[in-house]
Image (cartoon, helix red, strand yellow):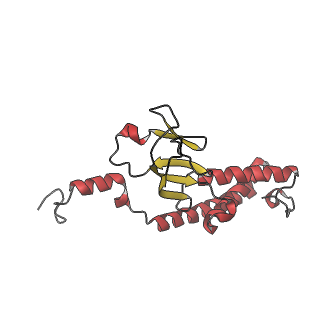
Amino acid sequence: MLSVIGESGLSDASSLHPSVITANGVLDTTDFDLQSKGWWFNTERQLTLVQDSDGKVTLPGNTLSFSLSNVHNLAPAEKVRYSKRGNRLYDTFKHSDVIGHPITVDITVRLSVEDLPSVAFNYVMHDAAYNMYVNDDGDNFKTDKLFNRRVEAWQRLYAEHLKVTAANALDNPTAQRLRMAGAGSHRSPNTVGSYR
């Protein structure tokens, strides 16, 4: 990041040099923006959180966001009943952080940059370098080169995400509901609009 603005690198990331402080801020923001989207590598699925002796449910300290697991049978209002307040769950119906029972959730957590998969680390590196250079009022030619590297890194990251999650258009909730309802199961493949 320092090299893109014409400065030499440092071995100590905790340096009080103004450029290092700026670089650390850009890196933190870039990393947060990426991880808050929720990826295969930082999402914990169907994690059951239990209440403490006061009936309160504490979220892990690195929680960015959460959602209830298995919500397909819940009423729409129940799906958004709980929110994150500090490091605890909050019941927006009861206006209280006393939940009183275990809750199963999907949690997006923030990992340290060093713990990211290489493809995600690579994207953070290129995005942070691009942001650092743009913030330093860099010239258009180098900005375009850094932007292109950033786009290529994003494409590799997203391709890996699709591969790991085995993304399929038939897996989306609408397609699954149609399949369960039997929609289209009697269509003839030989004639448009006809049924067997």
Q: Position of residue 166 (x, y in %)?
A: 43, 66
Task: Quadrant for the C terminus, please.
Answer: bottom left
Q: Quadrant of residue 169?
A: bottom left
Where 28 sits versus 153, above or below? above
Where 11 sits versus 77, above or below? below
**Which sits in the foreground, 172 or 90?**
90
**Which sits in the foreground, 151 or 142?**
151
Q: Position of residue 190 (x, y in %)?
A: 17, 66
Q: Quadrant of residue 93?
A: top left
Where 132 sits versus 11, above or below? above
Task: Quadrant for the N terminus, please.
Answer: bottom right
* Residue at (39% x, 39% y) in the render: 78
| Left or right, 190 with reference to 125 | left
| Left or right, 168 with reference to 153 | left
- Evaluate whether residue 139 shows in this view: no
* Residue at (66% x, 54% y) in the render: 31
